[in-house]
Image (cartoon, helix red, strand yellow):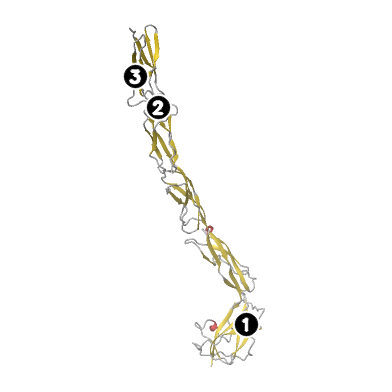
Amino acid sequence: MRASSATVLTFEVGPYTYRASPFTATAQVTGVGGLDTTVPVVYTGDCTNVTSANGCTGTATFAGDTNHDGGSDSDSITLTTKAASVNAVDKSKTYGDDNPALTATVDGTIGSETLHYTLTTTAVKFSNVSAYPIAVTLGSNPNYDVSKSDASLSITPKGASVTANGKTKVYGTENPALDASVTGTVNGNTLDYTLATTATRASGVGSYPIDVTLGTNPNYTINVTASALMVTPKQLTIIANSTTKILGATHSFAGTEFTSTGLVSGDTIASVTLSSTGAPEVATIGSYPIVPSAAVGAAVGNYSITYTNGTLKVLYLWNGFLQPINDTAHDAHTTALYSSFKAGQTIPVKFELRNASGQIITQTENPVFNRTARMGACSVVGDLEEAVYPVAPDSDGLFKLTGSQYNYGWSTKGLVPGLYQIYANLADGTTRSVYICLTK
């Protein structure tokens, strides 16, 4: 008769937490007579991974020998999951940029094993400035007990700039439209801002700020740059009034003998300095510039002034043609009677030239005589014809100086009765005339 034996199966000491390698057992057989041996262990179930059945059984069988009966033993263990974690990493980006790659830190895995999970966020490229969740969604990880922690994606404002554009305008005109150069915006965004200046239509020449005031722009950090509105002088033209004076007189300027063009409504020029080399008593016959300068007025600093000279003409004192031409005929014939003479006579045309003191003055060259053709019938004929003493006719067209008078013998022989105008062309540039009625 054979002796009994004992087969004992023993699993390695736990805990039986997933470790990516199988858990094992040993089987020892003992019996009387010094039996002490091992037998192989046969495993059923999954001794490496955590499964839905979640069991690992080891069975050892001793078939017996000549002296001992056979026997067997079995044991089971349950595998548990290993602790691991997936922690999403906080991210940031600037408004308008593409989302950054989402990442997480993984702890607790064994070797090169990886966990199944996904990372998502509700933020997109043009999401507004704010914090958006980065969510961890776990997949199937049967060997691990995975904890997770979400993170956030912070969208920060984008840098932009608003630079006011410099402007100019002429004094007295309306302000130009204000505008600015904007950089840094994306997605068709427009920035909220206003532009203002202290300058008005009436502002004087100078520099005035153009300020930028920002409104609400939550997705942008904006750098602003002010500028300036330059008010430039308005063009003003001051023209000295032309005038005359009598030879030997002193001409004085009050400072108001000018005209101006270009003044803004409400502005005035009080006075202008006027000077001329023809103003002193000693100035001779001729034309002299009247030079304006140094305008005075409350708003004169707002103008760019162009001064234009006038002309001061120094003239002979003219008291009209002398008898036998009637003094009353010295005006236009519409306001006075003509001097009337019989046609065919030689009419003495006489005058004197004087200075401001009444002294007789003579020209270097003889004055020139000329006349019009017949101008038509006389509209008014005087009752009396002027008496004419016989004089010699002149034919060279020049007045001759006789004593203190210039004389010309105007021959009317062959002229048709009617209205004529005769002239004395003087060296001072004037042409003196009178209307004469020739009668039958």
- Name the spot of residue 223 as percent of width and height, x first: 48, 45
Looking at the rendered structure, which numbered label has been put on residue 76?
Answer: 3
As drawn, 4 above or below 238: above
Q: Is residue 10 visible?
A: yes
Q: Nearer the viewer, residue 245 or 377?
A: 377
Q: Which circle, 2 or 1, is nearer the viewer?
A: 2
Q: Please report whichever mark, 1 or 3, sits nearer to the chain's N-terminal start.
A: 3
Q: Quadrant of the N terminus?
A: top left
Residue 45 is left or right of residue 235, and the answer is left
Residue 229 is left or right of residue 311, and the answer is left
Circle 3 SS class: strand
- Name the spot of residue 160 as percent of width and height, x first: 47, 45
Q: Please report whichever mark, 2 or 1, sits nearer to the chain's N-terminal start.
A: 2
Q: Identify the residue under disc 1.
A: 368
- Name the spot of residue 82 as percent of width and height, x first: 39, 25
Q: Nearer the viewer, residue 274 or 58?
A: 58
As drawn, 428 above or below 41: below
Residue drawn at the location 58% of the way across and 79% of the way down:
431
Q: Amino acid at mark 1?
A: Val
Circle 1 SS class: strand
- Name the spot of residue 381 as percent of width and height, x first: 50, 89
Q: Identify the residue under disc 2.
A: 84
Circle 2 SS class: strand
Distance from the alpha carbon under mark 1 to that under mark 3: 153 Å
Q: Are marks 2 and 1 in contact (CB under 8 Å)?
A: no
As drawn, 227 above or below 402: above
Q: Nearer the viewer, residue 51 or 131?
A: 51
Q: Nearer the viewer, residue 401 or 57?
A: 57
Distance from the alpha carbon under mark 3 to that under mark 2: 26 Å
